[in-house]
Structure formats: structure tokens, C-alpha cells
């Protein structure tokens, strides 16, 4: 039987049951969003006892399907006040799936200030006091080392870092990857929710677990081979991301004039070569040592867009060094030294803070005069201060929206109080519609219109024109909600968007695993259903169409080099979610 686990932090007791019938056919984001909509009071305080946080592997997690190691975490967000699903790599999703755990939920709130470690193994759930040495500002790298010594190097670990302990709105949940480094359920402040439950860490021990059952192993393997070939044959999924990581986008977006610079006041910079994907590849290759140009964030990843970035002596600094973080600290905050950006990225992983939200908050703080433009050393100090937070560290960790209010600014790039990521919506219209209408707050992963607007994968739509953008943003959000439910990495889209056989192979793997007969229409309907869950929650939480809007300054401040503004009317924006 597949297990559905509830952990009550008020009583420190757990219950294990069969999966409720309504969740049996769901996984990942579909399961987390359905559950949150069902059981979390939309008007509750996100850090109060009535919020609940749920962890759910995807439908294909734990199998040999390529790139299927993602997991969804869901709750009401303390950053946005909306429903939130945050997605992560690492080892936890595959371990849970192999243990037969469909999902586990943490609810309630202890009466005292004691922090706890929750351990999940094949025998059930154990809740015990967290070791004192991993509390009170201990960084995530050290906490993982200590927990590994206590529970074994083989275990999976999820952590509320120091930022989560202090319940800061941009806190993430950090997950140990197969090499003992960090992956994150980054956006929306779910680390603060975990911290509000007084849960410091979740330890997952898969010892004794079997394999995920497959109804038709032969059909599954055949579909898996077709799917893997579709990914590896694609120039982006199979080559570009492995060579240059997601940072390959720095030069691409800069050339397109859609790279937000100096707190979204321009769309192009002249120092992009300081930290482009090509520069990253060359730097890692030259330095050698611990450096790795290509690396997977979980077992079975064949895209391998991650990397290990070393210092000048070849010693590891950080991994999963993503485009959005590099952009936010580099182009948007004018920090021009690549190593400094890498050290800040490591520090953000160590304290457990969302690197997109924090990087954008830094640029807003620079415009507000709290930090000098380009002062990477000061930014590194402030991020480290989040471990035992100073007032300024708390303000930055409150997110870009909080910083804008503190500084009295109108140019604050947020939607529903979540920072806008690394694509300017004035110059890339499709992603602007995603930012405006996704239930999650500004989130590029909710409907990656960069594919058709810039990369010309799956569509060819002029990023500077409105034509075709509404339909495209709608389709991308529906498709993404479905993919997020499978446990697949978002980047599999590159391999299947223009490859019908690859897309059918993804569906065939699900059918072979569960002995069912889904069609592409069924998958499409799944994505629509997920979005309906999420929009229903937000509506009951008090959100209306008026919240589905980009910052007003984008309507009248044109961005160079194309000299364009955001020009969709409210009525046009509202068309995106009509399905």
C-alpha cells in the first residue's frame, strides 16, 4: 500500500494511512495544490498553527525515468499570502517514492520553542529534539554534516536553515543532493513555514525500501528509451545546458534586450562576459580541482545543467549556480566579480534563503540607498548576517516588496509580493503574462514563455509584440502544471516541445507504471485542474483579478534598447486564465 503520513507537531504524534481516494491518481504539484486547497484555511496566517505543509514526490519519482527526481512542497506562502508549490531536486523525492510514501503532511505547532528532527523510515515516523549544535545560526552545510554523522551518510535530508528558524519570509527549504550539497525548494518562503512548525530537519532513511512497482516494465523501459533520446538529441537539453548551465542565458537575454539591469531600469549591460555561461565553463575548466562543468542535481538526471564552481585554487565554492541568481546579483545589482557572486550564492544556500528573492531585494536595497551599487562584499556580509539576523539582514530577507516599502520606492519589481525573475516582461511579453497571472506570484517556472519568445522552442512568437502571447502563456501554464505533477524537471520541455514522440513517451511511461491509459487530452486536463485548485484557494484568500497585474512603473517606464513598455490591458491579461 502507498502511505499518506500526517505529522502533528502539537501532539508530536503521527498517523499513517492509505492514500485518500481523491489523491490516489495525483502526484507532485497536483497533489500538494489539491491538498492545500482542501485543508488549509485560505485566510489563516501562514506562520500560525492552521497552515499545513505537504511534501509529495511526482508520479514518476523513484523510477528509472530520466530526470524524474523532483519533488513538490506546498503550503500557504508567508511571502505572497497565496497558495504555493515549490519544486526541488536532491535525493528526497526518489527516496520517499521507493518507501511507498505518496506524501507527508506537517501540521499543528508545538506549545514551546523546542525544535525537532522528524525521521521517516520503513518502520514509520520518529520525532526527536534537534541537536543543539545545528540550531541558533548553524549553517546548512554544517548541519548536513552533523546530521549525516548521527543518522548516516546515506540519508536524505530537508532543512529549515537559519532563515527558516527565524521565519523570514524569503526562507527556503534546503535539500541534500547525492553529493551532500544543497538544492532548494526556493520560492515563496516555505522554509519559514517549516520553521514555524519548529521542524529543523527531516531525515529520510530508505534502508530496506524496495523498488517502485511498475505495472508493465517492458513498456516502461521502451518509453523511457524514447524519452531519453528526445532529451539527449535536443541541442539545448542534450548539449547547451550541460556545457554552460542555465547561465547560458546571460548572453542570450542580453542580446535580446530582455536582461533586467540595475533594478529593471535597462534591458542590456556591457559587462555580461564577466559572468556569462561561456565564462563559467571556461573558468571551471581552467581552475580544475573540484570544479565540474556538468553535474546532476539528482540521480537519473541526464540533462546535467548543474555544476561545481571552484575558487582560484580549485576548491569547491558552490553548485547549482543558476542564471537567475547570477543575473540578480550581477546585471541587476551590478556586482561584477564572478567569484564574489559565487560566494554570495554559497552563503544564501548556507542560511537557507531564496536566491532569486534575495538577489532582487538586494538591487531594490541598492536603489533605496541601503547598500552601495555593486558592493558585493557588503552583500555577502548581509547574507551571512541572516544566520543570526541583524535588522538590515531581516529587511532584505523579508523580500523585495518589503525592501521597497522600507525605502519608499515605487519601482519595486514584484507581483503578489514575489520578486520578478531574470526576464524583463516589457521586452518579453509572454513571460510577463505568466508573471501576472500565475497563482504563485511572479514565477518564470510557472509558464516558461522564454521557450517560444526567445529560444524558439515549441513556438516562434515575437517577444516584442502582443500577437499570440495570451494563448501561449495559457498553454505554457497548463502544460507546466501537469509536468510539475510528474516529478519531471521543467527542462524536459525542451526535448518534447517539438518532438511528438518524446511527449508521447512521457505519457507512455505514466501509463506503463500505473497500468492506465491516459491521453494527451487527459494530461492537459490535469494541468487545468491544478490551476483551478490554486486559483480557487487564492480567490478564497481574498485575491482577485486586480492582483494579476505587473508593477505599474512598467506601463510608463520604457526599457532600452527596444524602448518598450508593458502594454497589455487588464481585460487582455484576464483572458489568460479563461479555459
Image (spheres, helix red, strand yellow):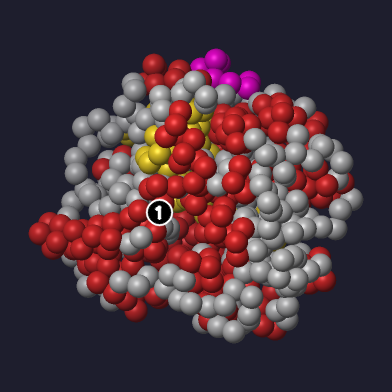
Does residue 349 lie above or below 267 as drawn? above
Q: Which residue is mark 1?
A: 240
- The x, y position of residue 114, in whole percent, is 59, 24
**Local secondary structure at mark 1:** helix
Does residue 577 lie above or below 421 as drawn? below
Front-lying residue, 321 or 45: 321
- Residue 237 seen: yes
**Residue 130 is inside the magenta segment:** yes
- The x, y position of residue 374, in whole percent, is 75, 39
Q: What residue is rendered at 54% in x and 20% in y?
A: 134
Q: What residue is rendered at 44% in x and 31% in y?
A: 286
Q: Is residue 517 left or right of residue 114?
A: left
Front-lying residue, 566 or 283: 283
- The x, y position of residue 107, in whole percent, is 53, 43
The magenta region covers 128-138
Does residue 29 lie above or below 212 as drawn? below
Q: Is residue 346 left or right of residue 540?
A: left
Q: What residue is rendered at 52% in x and 24% in y?
A: 312
Amino acid at each position: 500500500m502507498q502511505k499518506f503520513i500526517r505529522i502533528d507537531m502539537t501532539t508530536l504524534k503521527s498517523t499513517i494511512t492509505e492514500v485518500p481516494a481523491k489523491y490516489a491518481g495525483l502526484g507532485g504539484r497536483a497533489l500538494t495544490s489539491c491538498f492545500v486547497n482542501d485543508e488549509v484555511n485560505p485566510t489563516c496566517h501562514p506562520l500560525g498553527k492552521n497552515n499545513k505543509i505537504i511534501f509529495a514526490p511526482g508520479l514518476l519519482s523513484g523510477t528509472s525515468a530520466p530526470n524524474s527526481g523532483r519533488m513538490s512542497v506546498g503550503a500557504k506562502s508567508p511571502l505572497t499570502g497565496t497558495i504555493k508549490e515549490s519544486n526541488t531536486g536532491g535525493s528526497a523525492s526518489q527516496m520517499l517514492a521507493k518507501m511507498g510514501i505518496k506524501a507527508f503532511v506537517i501540521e499543528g505547532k508545538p506549545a514551546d520553542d523546542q525544535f525537532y528532527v522528524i525521521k521517516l523510515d520503513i518502520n514509520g515516523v520518529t520525532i526527536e529534539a534537534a541537536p543543539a549544535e545545528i540550531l541558533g545560526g548553524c549553517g546548512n552545510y554544517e548541519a548536513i554534516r552533523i546530521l549525516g554523522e548521527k543518522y548516516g551518510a546515506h540519508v536524505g535530508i530537508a532543512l529549515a536553515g537559519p532563515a527558516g528558524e527565524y521565519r523570514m519570509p524569503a526562507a527556503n527549504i534546503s535539500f541534500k543532493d547525492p553529493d551532500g550539497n544543497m538544492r532548494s525548494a526556493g520560492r515563496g518562503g516555505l522554509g519559514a513555514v517549516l520553521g514555524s512548525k519548529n521542524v529543523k530537519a527531516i531525515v529520510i532513511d530508505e534502508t530496506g525500501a524496495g523498488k517502485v512497482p511498475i505495472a508493465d516494465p517492458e513498456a516502461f523501459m521502451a518509453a523511457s528509451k524514447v524519452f531519453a533520446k528526445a532529451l539527449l538529441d535536443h541541442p539545448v537539453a542534450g548539449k547547451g545546458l550541460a556545457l554552460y548551465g542555465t547561465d547560458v542565458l546571460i548572453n542570450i537575454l542580453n542580446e535580446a534586450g530582455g536582461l533586467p539591469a540595475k533594478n529593471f531600469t535597462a534591458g542590456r549591460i556591457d559587462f555580461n562576459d564577466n559572468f556569462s555561461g561561456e565564462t563559467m565553463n571556461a573558468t571551471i575548466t581552467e581552475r580544475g580541482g573540484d570544479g565540474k562543468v556538468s553535474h546532476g542535481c539528482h540521480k537519473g538526471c541526464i540533462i546535467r545543467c548543474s555544476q561545481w564552481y571552484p575558487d582560484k585554487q580549485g576548491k569547491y565554492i558552490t553548485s547549482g549556480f543558476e542564471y537567475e541568481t547570477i543575473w540578480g546579483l550581477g546585471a541587476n545589482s551590478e556586482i561584477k566579480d564572478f567569484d564574489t557572486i559565487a560566494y554570495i550564492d554559497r552563503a544564501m544556500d548556507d542560511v537557507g534563503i531564496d536566491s532569486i528573492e534575495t538577489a532582487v531585494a538586494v538591487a531594490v536595497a541598492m536603489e533605496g540607498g541601503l547598500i552601495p551599487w555593486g558592493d558585493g562584499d557588503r552583500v555577502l556580509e548581509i547574507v551571512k548576517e541572516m544566520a543570526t539576523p541583524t535588522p538590515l539582514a531581516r529587511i532584505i530577507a523579508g523580500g523585495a516588496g518589503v525592501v521597497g516599502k522600507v525605502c519608499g520606492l515605487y519601482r519595486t519589481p514584484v507581483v503578489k509580493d514575489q520578486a520578478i525573475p531574470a526576464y524583463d516582461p516589457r521586452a518579453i511579453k509572454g513571460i510577463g503574462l505568466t508573471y501576472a497571472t500565475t497563482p504563485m506570484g511572479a514565477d518564470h517556472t510557472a509558464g516558461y514563455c522564454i521557450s517560444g519568445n526567445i529560444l524558439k522552442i515549441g513556438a516562434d512568437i515575437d517577444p516584442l509584440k502582443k500577437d499570440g502571447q495570451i494563448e501561449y502563456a495559457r498553454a505554457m501554464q497548463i502544460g507546466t502544471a501537469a509536468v510539475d505533477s510528474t516529478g519531471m524537471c521543467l527542462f524536459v520541455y525542451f526535448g518534447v516541445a517539438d518532438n511528438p514522440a518524446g511527449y508521447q513517451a512521457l505519457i507512455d511511461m505514466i501509463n506503463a507504471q500505473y497500468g492506465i491509459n491516459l491521453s494527451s487530452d487527459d494530461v492537459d486536463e490535469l494541468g487545468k485542474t491544478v490551476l483551478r485548485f490554486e486559483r480557487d484557494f487564492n480567490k478564497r484568500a481574498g485575491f482577485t483579478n486586480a492582483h494579476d497585474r505587473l508593477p505599474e512603473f512598467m506601463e510608463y517606464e520604457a526599457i532600452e534598447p527596444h524602448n518598450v513598455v508593458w502594454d497589455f490591458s487588464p481585460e487582455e491579461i484576464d483572458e489568460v486564465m479563461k479555459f
